[in-house]
Image: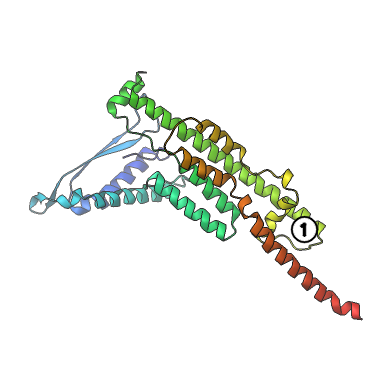
Amino acid sequence: MALPSELSVEQNRDLVRGFVQEQFVARGMVADIALHAPGREGDQRNHHAHIMLTTREIGPEGFGAKNRDWNAKELLVDWRSSWAEHVNRTLERCSVYERVDHRTLEAQREDALERASAAERNGDERVHVAEMARAVELDRPPLPDVGARGWSMMRRGIATPASDRWQEVREIGLQVREVAREFRTQARDWLERTLDRVQERGAALGLTRAPETALERLQAARASRGAVDTPSSALERLQAARAGRGEDRGVEIERNIESAGHALTQQDRERERVLEQERALERQRAAEREGPSHER
């Protein structure tokens, strides 16, 4: 079991013991825990634990029969979920920002896309862009298992087909993460520039109130689209890097990248229409307020 490198030895020890007591010992198993620190070679974040369990329940009368229910795949999924909850509670208690997720990359990506769609419907551009960037970051193949022998050969500089594949997948993951990071930065800057333009646009129209809605915050960008670039340059670099790789998931990755790159502009027409309605209503109200004064 991988342990958070952000935690101390004592914190990880308490984390593992709490999980083992709740999920294994309480069921009647005997657990043998071995905590391992990173070796002198390799990744120095590789703190991990090995847990050996009995297959027979133990009670006041000693060992009983084998419990084959413990071999159920559904129980393994529950243990993975419970471990993630234990880790995240410990990270939060220790004021560590990072969190873990036991789900597959595909499941996490689908969740991010659903959150992005919900944010889009609610007009929340910041959350929409953040979740689209997260979906792009998660749209990558998982690292393959190299095995103990493969790791030993890699540390000695001996290349194998498995290690070559691992390096290739790792490089893809690094590229995707870098693109997602740059996309977040560019999108944040884009939204800030948009807000500035909204304020300028509002002043030019004689509006005295500050922009309140998400629609208004984007209207200024429409006034001078040529000066406001959508955050796409980092995405284009990933598309160029992906070209010619022949990955099965390449088309799907690029589709999500393109969707993320145009996440802001796709909503402009609808926002402009609704905002124009709001502005027309504002003008009508202003005219009604001024009406009596003209009659006098």
Q: Which residue is mark 1?
A: 202
Residue at 52% x, 53% y: name it: 116
The type of colouring in the image is rainbow
Percent of width and height locating residue 196: 73, 51
**Residue 42 seen in this snapshot:** no
Residue 146 sits in quarter: top left
Q: Nearer the viewer, residue 19 or 205?
A: 205
| Kind of element beneath mark 1 | helix
User: Is 81 left, or right, of 180 in this rendering?
Assistant: left
Q: Outermost residue toward the top?
A: 157
Which quadrant does the N terminus fall into? top left
Amino acid on which disc 1 is placed: Gly
**Residue 269 seen in this snapshot:** yes
Percent of width and height locating residue 55: 15, 46
User: Is 260 left, or right, of 212 in this rendering?
Assistant: left
**Picture layout, residue 154 above or below residue 206:** above
Residue at 68% x, 43% y: name it: 229
Residue at 22% x, 53% y: name it: 26
Residue at 66% x, 56% y: name it: 269
Residue 37 sits in quarter: top left
